[in-house]
Amino acid sequence: MAVLFISRGTAAGARKLLDCLQRHTSFRFVSREDLVSVVNCHGALASKVVKKLERADRAYQQFSELRRPYVVLMRQALLEKVHGDGVVYHGHSGHLLLPPLQHFVKVRIEAPMSARVAMTMERFKYDEEMARDYIRTEDDRRVRWARFMYGRDVRDPKLYDLLLNLERVPIEVACRVLKGIMEDDQYRCTEDCERELVRLCLAAEIEAALVSDARTYLFEISANVEDGAVTLLGPYIEDETLEVVLRIGRGIAGVRSIDYKPGYAPYLSPTA
């Protein structure tokens, strides 16, 4: 089965669509809150990264310093949750954390403003003007967040495999469409996909361990894995600190050998 990533605007009707999928399928559902729970398992430093970043949207320097650790930790958590198949992740821009794989299907949910306003008025007991202001503010916040975090505009249709306009496609029809995609052999998790997931998961776990340790938190180090052989790429560091980095890497299950090379360490795949 496929892994489905659902992105949506504010009050776009995704909740009703998810409820429909839950009624008619046995898929596993993952939210951003589930990812935060995984991040918190990395310890106090990791937990602080997520909490501080949520409050740093007006503090550019702090936001910049926290961006990389946040991306590393959330990517590791997302990979842990979607490892396998038959999973639906619903969020705003989490799909931008991962490179494309054959069984990853990225979907954008859109809805007419009139329906979004009505939903917001019902949920928060707002009048029409308040509801419109809320939607515009939240949409703008999410767009700015994704642009700063990932350098992408979440409204760009080229980022998705499928865009569903709930003005034209009723919820029940959209539900059947997504169920059909999830179950289609075209998007099954092949052996190649599984091997790539194992490789990505191990690399992500190493990077998450490094940004969760106060001794290595500030170093921009990326991990590349090939059959359990790990190459770390990052800044030039002294021998004593290098040994700490390598020791942390060796402590991750599945690492057969580990090496360190000075160089530029990208933390987002150019194809993500």
Image: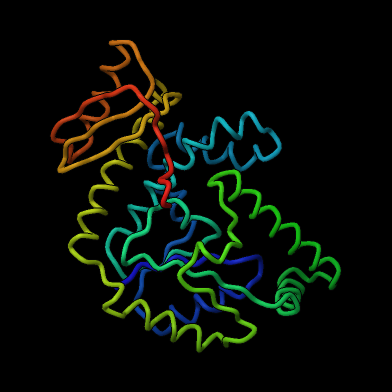
Q: Position of residue 218 (x, y in %)?
A: 45, 24
Q: Is 233 situated left or right of 122 in this image?
A: left
Q: Position of residue 252 (x, y in %)?
A: 23, 36
Q: Position of residue 1 (x, y in %)?
A: 29, 73
In this view, the residue in front, 216 or 26, is 216
Q: Is 222 situated left or right of 50 in this image?
A: left
Q: Position of residue 124 (x, y in %)?
A: 74, 68
| Residue at the image position 58 percent from the left and 50 percent from the top | 146
Q: Is 111 situated left or right of 237 in this image?
A: right
| Residue at the image position 49 percent from the left and 40 percent from the top | 70
Count of residue discs: 0
Examine the rendered structure and indicate whether residue 165 appears above or below residue 55. Answer: below
The quarter of the displayed image where residue 118 is located: bottom right
In this view, the residue in front, 119 or 154, is 154
| Residue at the image position 54 percent from the left and 69 percent from the top | 108
Colour scheme shown? rainbow
Examine the rendered structure and indicate whether residue 50 appears above or below residue 192. Answer: above
| Residue at the image position 39 percent from the left and 49 percent from the top | 77
